[in-house]
Amino acid sequence: MICFCLICFIFFFLFTLQDNLLLNVLTTTAKMGFEDNKSKQKGVLNCSDPCITFLLLYITCVSAPVGGFFLESCHLSHNAAICSDRHLKLVPKDIPPTVISFDLSKNQISRIQAGTFTNLLVLKDLNLHQNQILKIDNGSFSNLISLQKLTLNNNRLVKLGQGTFDGLSNLLELRLNTNNIAAVSSTAFQSLIRLKLLDISQNHLGTMKNLYMMLQHMPQLQQFTVRRNKLKHFYSWEFTNHSLDLQVLDLSNNPIRDFRITNNIFPNLTCLSIGDPFSVIKMEWDVKNKTFLRQVSSIDISGLHTTLQVMEELLETVNTSLTSLAANGIKHNRTKLINLACSIPTLSQFQFRRGNLRIITSDFLKPCVHVTELDLSENHIKTINENAFKSMEKLTVLRLSQNKLSVVPSAIQTLQNLSELDLSNNLIGTVNCHDFSNQTKLKELNLKNNSITLKDCVFKDLVRLQVLRLQSNQITDLKGAFKSSLSNLKRLHLNGNKLKAIRNGEFNGLKSLLNLSLHQNQIETLDKYSFVGLIKLTDIQLQSNALKKITFNLLANLRRLDLSDNRIQYPENATLTELPFSNLSCLEELSINAQHHRGKSTLPSNFLQGLKNLLRFSARNCQLIYLDKDTFTYTPKLERLDISSNDLQTLSPEHFAPIRNLKSLYISRIALQSLDFLRDAKLTKLKFLQGRHNQYSVITEDVIKSLPSLMYLDLKYISFYCACDNAWFINWTRNSKQTLVNGAYNYSCNYPDNFKGKKLLDLDLKPCLYDVNFISFVSTSCIVCFVMVGSFAYHLMRLQLYCAYYLLLSWLFDSKYKNNQAPHQYDAFISYNYHDEPWVMGELLPKLEGEQGWRLCLHHRDFQPGRSILDNITDAIYGSRKTICVISRRYLESEWCSTEIQAASYRLFDQKKDVLILVFLEDIPTYMLSPFHRMRKLLKRQTYLSWPRAAGQPGVFWEKLRKALQTGNDPSEENVLLTLTGT
Ligand SMILES: *[C@@H]1O[C@H](CO)[C@@H](O)[C@H](O)[C@H]1NC(C)=O
Ligand SMILES: *[C@@H]1O[C@H](CO)[C@@H](O)[C@H](O)[C@H]1NC(C)=O
C-alpha cells in the first residue's frame, strides 16, 4: 500500500513537473522541431489519471471525520449524557457507549422504538421524564443490561404491553408517575425480578388485578407507590395469596371504599399511606388478624374520610408499633382523633396539619405525653393556651409554621426540652425579653417571614442556639441583640430585612458564628469594627445592599465574601491608599458581581492586595472598561476567574502571567476582539473556558493548542466566520477526544454573507483540505522527487541541462528584444573564451578592425560598466549585425552554452537571420561535437571558418571572414556564401 502510494506520488509529481515546471522548456523544444517530445508528454499524462483518482481517494479517506467528542444535542459531563430540554423528537444516536447516566427529560419524544438503546451496555440511569411517550415497542430496553433506574414520569403511556420492560433484569427503580396507564399486560413486568421501587402514582389504574400483574413478578419489591389512581377497593385475596417483602405501600389519594386484608401478605410493611381528601364515601376497614400489620411504624392517614369507629380499628391494628402518624387535613372529630393517637404509647412523631384548629386549648394536647415531635403547621392558629403543651414534657421539636400567631406563644415556656422551634410565616411583631427565657436547650429557632423587630435582651437565654433564622422580617436596627448573647450561634440569617448600618461591635457576642447572611438589606456603611468579635466567621453574604466603601480588616478566618450588587465604585486609574481586603489572607472566594448598571467603572490596580489565598474571583457585569495588568499579581492561587459582561474589549497575556493556576475562565460578553492573548498567556491548567457573545469570529489552532488541559469550551452566540480560516477549529470540534465543545451543533455563521445563518459544523471542509493539506502534501512530494530526479539528471545529463537552462533564458531574452529594432551599433560581437584572448587580440582584432575597418564589440572593452552582464551581452548581440564565435575546445566547454551564443543562435533559427559566424581555432572531431546538439545542426546548415586549415594562406581566411561580415542577414544570401566556401 505504502509502496503503491509512493509510486503514485512519483508519477504524479512527474506529471506535475512535466506539465507545469517544464512547460516552457517543452514548448520551446517543440517550437524548435523536437516533435517526438510531444508523444512522451502524452504518455505520461495517460498514466497519471488513475493516480490522481487514487490520490483524491486517499485524501478523502484520511480526512473523513471520525466519531468524536461533540454531541449534536447533548452535553457530556463525567459519563453523564445530558440532553434535557432540547426539543428532541428522537433519542440521539451519538451517545458514547461509556455513559452511565442519560438524561432525556423535557423533550418531545413520542415513541421508544426497538433498537433505540443498543450500545449502552453500562448505562445505569435513564431519565425520560416529561416527554410525550405514548408507546414503547417490545424489547426497546432489552440491551440495557446494567440499567438500575428508569424514569418515565410525565408521559402519555396508556398501556404497558407485554415485553415492555424485557431485559431489565437489573432494574432497581422504576418510575411511571403521571401517565395515563389504565391497563398492564400480564408479562410487561416479568423481567423486573430485582425491582425494589415502583412508583405508578397519578395514573388510571382502577383494579387490583393490575397491581397483581405487576407485583407477582417482583419478589424483592420494597416500595410500592400507587398514589392518585382510581382504586376503589383493596382486597388482599384478589391481589396475591403469598407474602410480599413490601416495606412501603402508598395507596393515598385513591377513592378506596373498602380495605380488607385476610392473610398476612405484608409481614414486613413499615410505612402505610391511605386516605383521600376528595372522597365522599366513608372507607371500610377490615384487617382480620391484629398481627398482620404489626411492623407498621409509620402511617399516613391524611385526608382519610371514615367513621370514628374505623379510625379506632385502624389505629388499634398498628398500635403496638406505631411511632409516626400523619393525620393532615382531617377536620372532623379532631379531639377524639388526638385522644386515639396519643394513647398509642409508642407514638413520638405527630403531624396534624391543615386541621383548621384556630385555637389550642389547654386540654387538646393533654394525652400526648409521649410525643417528641409535633407539627401543627397550617392550622390558622391564633391563640395557644399557656398550658397547652404542659403535659408534653418530652417535646423536642415543635412546628407552628404558617399560622396566625402575633406573639411568641407563652405556652412554649413550659417546654424545657425543646431543641427546635419553628415559628416561621406567622404575624409576630415584637419579641419580648422573656419569650425564650426557658429555652436553654434550643438549637434551632426559625422566625423567618414575620414582622419582627429586635430588642437587646430577646436572645439572652438561648445559650445553646446554633441556627437563628430571622430573614424576611422588618428589622431596621439590631439594637444590640447580638452584642453579648448567643455565644454558640453558628448560622445567623438576617437577610431580607431593612438594616441600614452595622454599628461597631454589633456582633460582638457571636464568638462561634461561622455564617452570616446580611444580603438584601439596605446597608450603606460598614464601620471599621462592624464585625469585631466574629473570630470564627468563614462566610459572609453582603450582596444586594447599598455599600459604597468597604474595608474588612478583622475577619482573619473569612473564606467566602459576597459583595455583589452594591454601589462600590472607583474612579479611573485609582490606586487605593486604604486596602479593602488587606487582612483577609484566608479568603478563597470573592464576588463583586453587579446586577444593575451604575456607569462605567474600573478596578484599582491594588484592589485585590492581601488576598494571597484567593481561589475564585468574580466581577461579572461591573461595567469595567479597563483591567490593570497588575490586578492579579496579589492572587497567585487564583483558579476561577469570572469577568463576564464587562466592557473590556481586550485582554493581554500580562493579565494572566501571575495566575498560571487558572482552571476556569469566564469571559463572555466582554466585546473581546480576539482570543490571541491565550496563545502567550500559557494557561496550561485551564480546564473550562466560557467565551460567549464576543466579537471574535475565527478560532485558530495555536489558541486551542495553548490550552492543553481544556475539557470544556463554550463559544455559544459567536458570529463565526465560515471559511477555511476556521477549518482547523471545525475539524478539532468534531474530533477532539478531550474537550467537550458545548452547544457546538448550534454554532452558526455570520460571515461571509452567503453563509449567514448556516451552521458552522455543516461547513464542507473539502475545499479547505485541498488548500492546506493537499497543496502542502503535493508540494512536499514534488520537492522530494524533484531533488531525486534532479540529482539523477545532473549526474547523467549535466551538460544538456546546462544548455537547456541557457536556451530557456535566451528564449526569454529573445522574446524581450524581438521587436526592438534599434540600429546596429557594431558590425560584429566577438564571443571567445579568455584562453583564446591572445589570438583574438593579436590576430583577429588588428585584421578586422585595423585593416578591414569593421567596428567590433569586445566584452572587456566595450561593455558599459555598472550595467548587468546579461544586459550588456544582450545589448551587444542585438546591437551587432553579426556574432563571431571563436571556437576552441575550451570555448565549447564553457562558452557555447552561454546566453550570448544561445541568444544569437536563437535569432538565427527563429528570425531566419544569419547572425552567427563560426571560427574554429582548432580542429575538433565531429564526435566531440555530439553533445552540442545545436552546434551540429548549425554546422550542417552553416558555413564555418577553420584557422588551422588556413595555416598556409591566412589571406584567404581573412578575406572569407570579410565576406561573411559583409553579407546581410538574408539566409538566401548566406546560402550563396555556403556554396562558395563549403567545407
Ligand atoms: C421480611 O423480612 C425478613 C427479615 O429481613 C426476611 O427474612 C423475610 O423474608 C421477609 N419477608 C418476606 C415475605 O419477604
Ligand atoms: C393471627 O396470626 C397469627 C400469626 O400470624 C396467629 O398466630 C394467630 O393465631 C392469628 N390470630 C387469629 C385470631 O387468627
Image (spheres, rainbow, N blue to C red):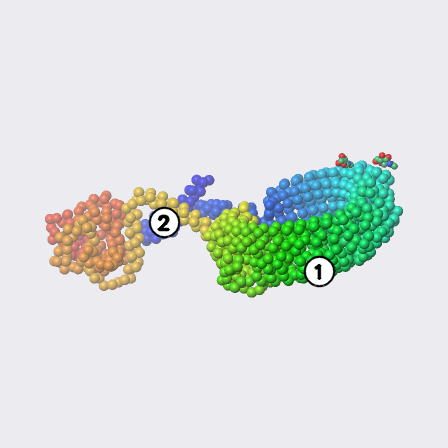
Classify mark 2: helix, strand or loop.
helix
Image vertical order of residue 566 relative to residue 270, above or below: below
Circles 2 and 1: CB distance less than 8 Å? no
Q: Residue at x 49, y 45 (%)?
A: 62
Front position among marks 2 and 1: 1
The three-letter code of the residue at mark 1 reads Thr
- The reply, left or right, for residue 367 in relation to residue 476 is right
The three-letter code of the residue at mark 2 reads Lys
Residue 524: image location, x then y, percent: 61, 62
Give the residue at mark 1.
453
Residue 875: image location, x then y, percent: 24, 59
Q: Of marks 2 and 1, which one's residue comes earlier in the chain?
A: 2
* Residue 557: mark in rendering: none
Residue 351: image location, x then y, percent: 78, 49
**Ligand 1 sits in which quadrant?**
top right
| In the foreground, 253 or 950 | 253
Residue 867: image location, x then y, percent: 25, 59
| In the foreground, 192 or 10 | 192
Give the residue at mark 2.
38
| In the foreground, 408 or 871 | 408
Q: Residue furthest bottom?
A: 599
**Could you tell me how far apart the alpha carbons at marks 2 and 1 are, in whole angstroms?**
106 Å
Label 2 near ligand 1 (CB < 8 Å): no
Whether residue 801 is visible, yes or no, is yes
Q: Residue at x 79, y 42 (%)?
A: 297
What crowding class fits label 1: few (fewer than 14 Cα within 10 Å), some (14-19), or many (20 or more)? some
Whether residue 748 is visible, yes or no, is no
